[in-house]
Image (tube, rainbow, N blue to C red):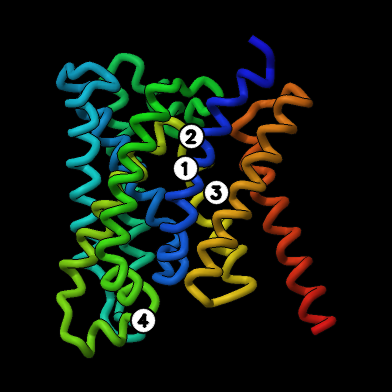
Amino acid sequence: MSGLQLMIPPFVACMVLVAMLSYLGLHVIAREVIFVDLSLAQMAALGGLTALLVHVAPDSGTAYLFALLATALGALVFALTRTSGAKGRVPQEAFIGIVYVVASAAAILVANKVPGGGEAIEKTLTGSILWVTWPTIAKLAVAYAALGVFHYVLRHKFLTISFHPEEAERAGWKIRWWDFWFYLSFGVVITLAVPVAGVLMVFSFLVVPAVVAFLFTRDMRRLAYIAWGSGALASILGLWLSLAGDLPTGPLIVCMYGVVLVGAIALRRVAGATG
C-alpha cells in the first residue's frame, strides 16, 4: 500500500470529525465552556476503564455503554451547574475543571487495577487516527449524521440558548433540561471521537476552527462555513506534511491547527488595518 493510499482513511475520518466538531465548537465558544470536551472525554475514559475493571471486552458495545453512562453523568452535572443571568456566583468553567480533575484521578485509580490500564489512558490522549479502519469511519459517519439531524431539528432551542440565553430565559424555557440534551449529545460525539483521534486532536478540531470563525463574523451561517473550511484546511495540511515528512500524524495535525489560527489572526489584523 502506498503512502497516499494509507492517508485516505485518516483524511475521510478527519473530514467526518471536522463536520461535527467544528459546528459544536461554535456552541462551546458562545457558551464560554472551552474545556467541556476534555471533561466529557475524561468521563468517557473513566467509564471505559470501569468496563474493563468488571471484565467487559474493550471496544465492545457494552464498553461503549459504560462510557456513555459516565458521559451522561457529566452532562447532568453541567446542565445543573449552568449559571443563570450574565454571571453566576461560581463560573461554570470551574465545575467543568473540577469534573475533569476528579474524573482523571478516578481513571488513574481504576487503571491501576486494570491490566493494560496505562495503555488505555495513553490511547485516550493520542488516539489512532493513522490506523483508523473503514468500518470505524462508517460507524462514526452514521452516528454523526444521526446526531446532526438531532441538532438540526432542535437548532432553534440549542442556538438560542448558546448565543442568546437571555431570550431563552425571557421565554421561560427549561434551560437546564435543554442543556442536558445538548451536553448528552455532545458527550456522545466526544465518546465516539476520542478513540479515533485522541483528546488533543478532538480539542483542536472543536475549539480552533470556532475561534478562527469568531475572529471574522458573528453570523451563524458564515461562522459554520469558516469553521468547517479552516478545520478542513488544517487537517489536509497536517496529513500532507505527515506523509511528505514521515512525521507522526496526530501531533502534526494539531500543530497545523495552531498554524492556521496564527494565520487567521494575522489576516484579521491586516484586514482590520486596511479596512
| Label 2 element class | helix
Give whichever of discs 1 and 2 has the lower sequence position.
Answer: 1
Badge number at residue 17: 1
Q: Mark 4 touching mark 3, by CB under 8 A?
A: no
Would residue 134 appear left or right of 145 to someone viewing this image?
right
Kindly check if marks 1 and 2 are in contact, taking CB atoms under 8 A apart as contact.
Answer: yes
Q: Which mark is residue 164?
A: 4
Q: Earlier in the sequence, mark 4 or mark 2?
A: 4
**Alpha carbon separation for disc pair 4 and 2:** 32 Å
Q: Position of residue 254 (x, y in %)?
A: 62, 42
Q: Looking at the figure, which quarter contains the N terminus?
A: top right
- Amino acid at circle 3: Ser
Determine the CA span between mark 2 and mark 3.
Answer: 10 Å
Q: Which residue is mark 2?
A: 197
For badge 4, the amino acid type reads His
Q: Distance of mark 3 from mark 1, alpha carbons? A: 11 Å
Q: Quadrant of the C terminus?
A: bottom right
Q: At 17% from the left edge and 79% from the top edge, which residue is drawn?
A: 173
Which residue is under mark 3?
204
Q: Secondary structure at mark 1?
A: helix
- Mark toward the viewer: 1 or 2: 1
The mark that comes first in sequence, 3 or 1, is 1
Q: Name the mark nearer the viewer: 3 or 1.
A: 1
